[in-house]
Amino acid sequence: MFELADRFSGALLGTHVGDALGMPVEGYSPHYIRSSFGEVREMLEARLGAGTYTDDTEMMIAVAESLVRKRGFDGEDMAQSFLENFDPRRGYGAGTVSALKLIRSGVRWDLAGSRVFEGGSYGNGSAMRIAPVGCLYHHDLQKLKEVAFASSSITHAHSHGKEGAALQACAVALAVRSGPGRGLDVKEYLAAIKQFLDPGSVYRAKLQLVEELLQGKAPFDEVVQELGHDSRALYSVPTAIYSFLRHHEDFEEALVYAVGLGGDTDTIAAMAGAIAGGYHGKKAIPVRWLQALERGPKGANYIEELALKLCRLHREIVSP
Ligand code: RVK
Ligand code: MG
Ligand code: MG
């Protein structure tokens, strides 16, 4: 498979792999996970079966479908795509459910998100689904930011939600651009992310912490204490970036590490999986994990087809 297509597949399948690996231990502390399961290195049994995905992947699929269908961002279409794919058994966040209900009842796609919570949601729900945007616009970070903000605002209109989605998209984009061939310069990668963030962004301080924590190979507790591991974007997107950077040589280790941090494990591992998958490509995802993924109509094969379509679209955008 061509290198770029393999990375797009890696980012989208990486979302599914991380989501499925993390979901069975969602909400547990790092200590409880270690004492009850040891390291989570295999797809554990889950409510919908081992290897199944949750809202993270379902919404990522919806984003990719809409981008491919409309050859770029179309807010109305993406909102409809969320509604068409919505399956409550996948376990959605409360704010996202409220925003989608408003849209279903006729509220415009660009108004519903700001009617959720006070000033919109700052949950990680718009960052967890953003991998297709990170892939499609990896060559143009300004466009990437614009589309990440707009796609986030459908359900997550708070600035922390929108910035978190843009940051995660940027992390995926830089990973797709880098690739393991040349080796990753962590300092350069973090500098590029900081340059991408708006000057007043609250994420700047978190990225500084990521850099500091990487130097000392901090223990689990310290990482959780400093970066967080819950479902707010500010307390999970930097955690996912840290998980990738701490184990950037190895896709499997990055995801096992992300799950081991506990808390919002499906989402932090889904985001780490998108970045690590974009960097290493599908070829680096352990075969036993790929074989355990969903095989239904919107399972792993379908996700890979979407990645290939997205890659074709990317090439057409770059050289019309
Ligand atoms: C079930 C106060 C706010 C807030 C605001 C808090 C799935 C709330 C996925 C809220 C992910 C939570 C996760 C998540 C994705 C957000 N004021 N509190 N303005 N904005 N919160 O509900 O799609 O697992 O506690 O918008 O972002 O696997 O419940 O959902 O882990 O953040 O849900 O934000 O969640 P939501 P989401
Ligand atoms: Mg989930
Ligand atoms: Mg989650």
Image: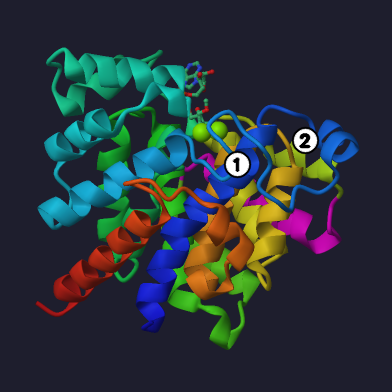
Q: Which image quadrant: the N terminus?
A: bottom left
Res 216 → quadrant:
bottom right
Amino acid type, residue under disc 1 in the picture: Ala
In the foreground, 194 or 141: 141
Q: Which residue lies at the image location 19% right of the left edge and 22% below the top edge?
A: 111
In the foreground, 211 or 242: 242
**Which disc number belongs to residue 50?**
1
**Which disc number belongs to residue 62?**
none
In the foreground, 54 or 188: 54
Graded by Cα atoms within 10 Å as few (under 14), some (14 to 19) or many (20 or more), the crowding at tag 2 reads: few
In the foreground, 24 or 32: 24
Q: Is residue 201 located in the magenta-colored stretch of the structure?
A: yes
Q: Magenta segment range?
A: 200-218
Q: How is the image coloured?
A: rainbow
Picture coordinates of residue 196 (x, y %)? 42, 58
Amino acid type, residue under disc 2 in the picture: Gln
Query: With 143 as the anchor, is 31 left or right in this view?
Result: right
Q: Is residue 314 located in the magenta-colored stretch of the structure?
A: no
